[in-house]
Image (cartoon, rainbow, N blue to C red):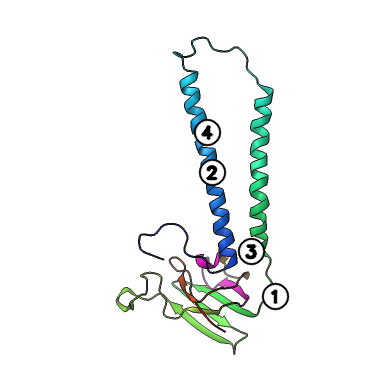
Amino acid sequence: PTPGATGFQPAATELARDLQWLDGMLLVIITIITLFVTGLMAWVFIRYNRKSNPTPATFTHHSALEIAWTIVPIVILVFIGAFSLQVLFKQQEIPAADINIKVTGYQWYWGYEYPDNGDISLISNMVEDADLEPGQPRLFAADEAMVVPVDTTVRVIVTAADVVHAFAVPQFGVKVDAIPGRLNETWLRAEKTGRGSGRSLLPIWRCRRR
């Protein structure tokens, strides 16, 4: 995260790029619809007010117009669905993983386990303001980051030990609920090295070359 910045953080996975592209496409569609409706209302207010149009029309239906305002929204929704379903399937279909990581949410901290790498486990706490090092963002830095290699498919198994949490890394396009007594899963494949962060009590990640 960058102070004062707006928009998404730079994508570090293909899935994150797809999500950001989809968001941009939806923003364009929403903007066009908003401008069209606003212009249409302004035209109606000006053209059909009492002063400009003292004698109103007597008809109450317009079949072609009614068909159009029914069909056009359907076409727009089908168009949006054709792209959003592809991204949804990419999120939900977990590919064969090179590495498995189990993430457990606790109140105020996270636990990470690497069962495929010597059963490594660590506890990740948010760094207090007084302990921040140069370059560490406030409320985002952790003393033990979740480390994943680049160009590697990572399956993340998510649960919680106490209350409901949310495991999320915006740069990866990943967000999944951590629920006590339940195992959820997601996946990621980092394309570049770096360090990123989630929000609030969400995990910190760091990438390294294999």
In this rendering, the label closer to the viewer, 1 or 2: 2
SS for tag 3? Answer: helix
Q: Distance between the residues labelled 1 and 2?
A: 37 Å
Q: What element carries label 2?
A: helix
Q: Give the range drawn in magenta.
A: 152-173
Q: In which quarter of the image is the C terminus?
A: bottom right
Earlier sequence position, callout 2 versus callout 4: 2
Task: Give amino acid for label 4.
Answer: Val
Q: Which residue is drawn at 29% across and 76% down?
A: 130
- The reply to whether callout 3 and callout 1 are in contact (CB within 8 Å) is no
Q: How crowded is mark 2: few (under 14 residues within 10 Å), some or many (20 or more)?
A: few
Q: Is residue 187 above or below residue 39?
A: below
Q: Does 187 appear above or below 26?
A: below
**Residue on which disc 1 sits:** 96
Which structural element holds mark 1? Answer: loop
Q: Do the residues labelled 2 and 4 touch (CB within 8 Å)?
A: no
Q: Magenta stretch containing residue 126, yes or no?
A: no
Work out which quarter of the rendered image holds the N terminus and state it.
bottom left
Q: Position of residue 156 (x, y in %)?
A: 60, 74
Question: Which residue, given by chain and number where applicable, does mark 3 sit on?
Answer: 91
Look at label 1 and name its amino acid: Ala
Sooner in the amino-acid sequence: mark 1 or mark 4:
4
Label 2: which residue?
A: 30
The residue carrying mark 4 is: 37
Q: Earlier in the sequence, mark 3 or mark 4?
A: 4
Q: Which of 21 and 107 is in front in this view?
A: 21
- Mark 3 Cα-neighbour bin, 10 Å: few <14, some 14–19, many ≥20: some
